[in-house]
Image (cartoon, rainbow, N blue to C red):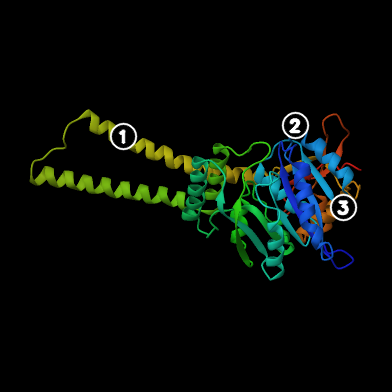
Amino acid sequence: MSEAGGRKLISIVVPVYNEEGNIFPLHEAVTAVFAPLADRYDHEFVFTDNHSEDRTFAELTALAARDSRVRVFRFSRNFGFQRSIYTGYIKARGDAAVQIDCDLQDPPELIVEFIRTWEAGSQIVYGVRRARKEGLVITAVRKVFYRLIDLLSEDRLPLDAGDFRLVDRRVLDVLRRITDDKPYLRGTLATLGFVQKGIPYDRAGRVRGESKFSLRDLFGLALDGILAHSTVPLRMATYTGLAVSVTTFLGIIGYVVGRIFFGASWPLGFATTTVLILLSLSLNALFLGIIGEYVGRIYQQVRRRPLTIIAESIDASGARATDATRATDATRATGATSSDAEQGTASIRPPGGAVTDATFPVPGDHHIVDVATRDR
């Protein structure tokens, strides 16, 4: 929150996975952006490490030793990009949070424009990609992806907007009460209301490392976006079933009329019968699959498993979260009583370590389990 001297705090949320070569360059670039703003704004870094397999966490540890504004949360495994951002938002302490990718494809200089637009009254400020230096295939797939979600969604989602955005504290507080098992933050934020504005920019190419987002990941993200914000696929199943039923009924009537009045019979042929049967089976399988996707998401949601598990963390405070602290945080986030929050605690044994008390999800606690805070 705002510093004692009246300066506002901006949290820079950075999800990382195998980005060892980009940690220090990103830190330097963002720090340079805030240098002229030091009289009005302070900033912190919130790195969420999705269990990187290279030296990313070692680089983050070294960076945190040099800069007390750096906070690091390392997950027990890779929980996915959207959950990583979500956890960063929950851990952010600022009056606003800016999410930026570690690869520097999104220009840190645009943060100044984000802040200016935020101060003018917008609660959500997002970047809109005019151009991006990627292959033609992946660029075309992304464009189709955004427009498909917008077409099928029951909510209007901004086109060509990624996750480079600023989110006001009031919006972050609302996010604390949302417990989607498969969060799709672009859609979730777009549906919350508030004053939102897009800022166009050109996205640069990668200088170091390689993208961790494959076509398969993009397809999965598209599926999450559609199923999280639309019941159109279910309605398609209903409408298609209705159309097939009507067509079948009309066909039966036509056959009966032709048989009675004209002596006509249905043309014989194994191929025709086989095609009709296969078409029927294919439609059934397709729409059962769609229904299964929705049912599967309901099943995952009611299981209330953690969205993320923080196995190791580095924080400037150097304080380890206690049961009382976690209960207080849960109470503050949800408006529940202290006893309600306390009922969300349980014991977890980290690999090779002692039993550690951790908070399991209570309503609004975001399914984030923190089992370790590492002192400086």
| Image quadrant where residue 168 sits | bottom right
Tell me if 70 is positioned left or right of 165 in this view: right
Which residue type does callout 2 highlight?
A: Asp
Q: Rate crowding at label 2 as few (under 14), some (14 to 19) or many (20 or more) other CA atoms within 10 Å.
A: few
Q: Nearer the viewer, residue 41 or 360?
A: 41
Secondary structure of the residue carrying tag 3 is: helix
What's the CA distance linking mark 2 and mark 1? 53 Å
Residue 146 in view here: yes
Which residue carries the number 2 mark? 54
Residue 340 in view here: no
Residue name at image x 78 percent, y 40 percent: 74
Residue name at image x 38 percent, y 40 percent: 283
Mark identifier at residue 325: 3
Q: Position of residue 71 (x, y in %)?
A: 83, 47
Tell me which label, 3 or 1, sits earlier in the chain. Answer: 1
Identity of the residue furthest to the left in this view: 262
Which residue carries the number 1 mark? 277
Which residue type does callout 3 highlight?
A: Thr
Tell me if 201 is positioned left or right of 99 in this view: left
Q: Position of residue 139 (x, y in %)?
A: 52, 45
What's the CA distance linking mark 2 and mark 3? 33 Å
Tell me which label, 2 or 3, sits earlier in the chain. Answer: 2
Tell me which label, 2 or 1, sits earlier in the chain. Answer: 2
Which residue type does callout 1 highlight?
A: Ile
